[in-house]
Image: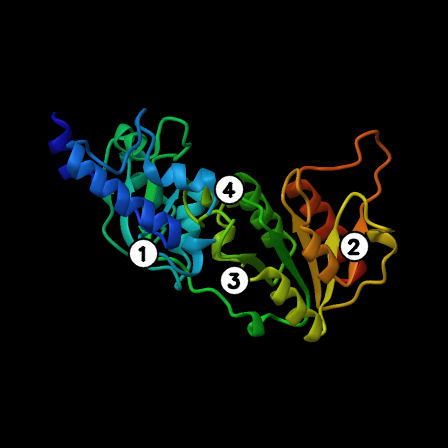
């Protein structure tokens, strides 16, 4: 089977985006016309949308030109169960089609039966897709002034690793977080690796995209939120800080931590004391621990 025949049976996801991504793609299309080389996949066969995702840069959650790519059992079946998520296309293997039928899962649209290798070629050999891939519309996001006032919100300060953001989303769903606030830039798209790492949590935790995190934190302070920045060199231990709802826990990027302006805007900057010789955690682990402390202190564990 030729590449042209294969593509006609199983087309790749459309690439899209805003700002720099859009400009780069236009440039790539122009270069491909002049050089005669195909665009959309860099050398080595890695899908272009995965390269953009690895660089960072939640565009796909509230907005975006192209479809959101969801793969893996939990990510896709949670999307199918979410009435707010519009499914455009659904690709399944024979075994998955049988499982969907056995478990009486409503696919909402007729799925297309494909071979596992077809999905491998879409996503790359390292993606654990479990024989299930969907193209879907992005979910609508919340506005900052729509944040609930009765629980915990997470704020992400330029955390760009999709695995970390996906793991944070999963913990947020487990602890009943009301929303996640992130910037439109310097954050990964809510698709692909992030969605798989979130294991369905994208369908459960609303996302608020803001253009300026410093300004957003100021508005949250004015709205009565206690904004607590988490930093290993914070003056107070989080377990000793008087906490109240609405509470916003602010997490910084791996290595860099909170930016200076973010630290200055937070109501409190706190650390989490640990008995071991290593005093800092991976940001997704730190988020889970902070959420446990926060929900326990606010009496939200019941």
- The x and y percentages for residue 207 are 52, 60
Q: Is residue 239 left or right of residue 130?
A: right
Identify which residue, 85 or 140, lies in the foreground.
140
Task: From the image, tell me which residue sits under label 2.
Answer: 269
Q: Circle 1 sits in a helix, a strand or a loop, which is it?
A: loop
Give the residue at mark 4: 162
Mark 2 falls on what kind of element? strand
- Specify which label sits upstream in the sequence, 2 or 3: 3
Image quarter (top left, top right, bottom left or bottom right) of the C terminus: bottom right
Q: Secondary structure at mark 4?
A: helix
Circle 3 residue: 211
Residue for point 32% across, 35% down? 47
**In whole angstroms, how far apart are the C-alphas of marks 2 and 3?**
23 Å
The mark that comes first in sequence, 1 or 3, is 1
Label 4 Cα neighbours within 10 Å, binned few <14 / some 14-19 / many ≥20: many
For the residues carrying marks 4 and 2, which lies nearer the camera in this image?
2
| Viewer-nearest of discs 4 and 3 | 3
Q: Which residue is mark 1?
A: 65
């Amino acid at each position: 089977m030729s590449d042209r025949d294969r593509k006609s049976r199983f087309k790749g996801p459309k690439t899209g985006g805003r700002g720099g991504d859009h400009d780069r793609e236009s440039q790539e299309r122009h270069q491909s016309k002049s050089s005669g080389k195909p665009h959309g996949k860099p050398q080595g066969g890695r899908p272009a949308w995965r390269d953009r995702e690895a660089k960072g840069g939640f565009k796909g959650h509230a907005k975006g030109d192209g479809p959101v790519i969801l793969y893996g059992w939990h990510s896709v079946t949670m999307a199918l169960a979410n009435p707010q998520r519009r499914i455009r296309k659904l690709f399944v293997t024979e075994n998955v089609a049988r499982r969907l039928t056995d478990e009486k899962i409503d696919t909402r649209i007729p799925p297309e039966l494909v071979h596992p290798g077809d999905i491998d070629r879409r996503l790359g050999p390292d993606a654990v897709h479990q024989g299930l891939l969907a193209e879907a519309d992005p979910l609508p996001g919340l506005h900052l002034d729509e944040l609930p006032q009765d629980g915990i919100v997470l704020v992400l300060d330029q955390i760009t690793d999709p695995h970390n953001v996906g793991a944070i989303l999963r913990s947020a769903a487990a602890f009943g977080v009301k929303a996640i606030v992130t910037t439109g830039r310097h954050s990964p798209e809510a698709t692909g690796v992030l969605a798989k790492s979130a294991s369905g949590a994208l369908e459960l935790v609303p996302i608020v995209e803001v253009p300026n995190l410093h300004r957003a934190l100021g508005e949250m302070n004015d709205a009565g939120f206690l904004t607590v920045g988490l930093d290993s060199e914070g003056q107070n231990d989080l377990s000793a800080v008087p906490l109240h709802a609405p509470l916003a826990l602010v997490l910084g990027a791996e290595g860099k931590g909170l930016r200076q302006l973010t630290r200055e805007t937070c109501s409190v900057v706190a650390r989490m004391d640990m008995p071991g010789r290593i005093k800092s955690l991976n940001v997704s682990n730190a988020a889970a621990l902070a959420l446990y402390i926060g929900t326990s202190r606010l009496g939200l564990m019941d």
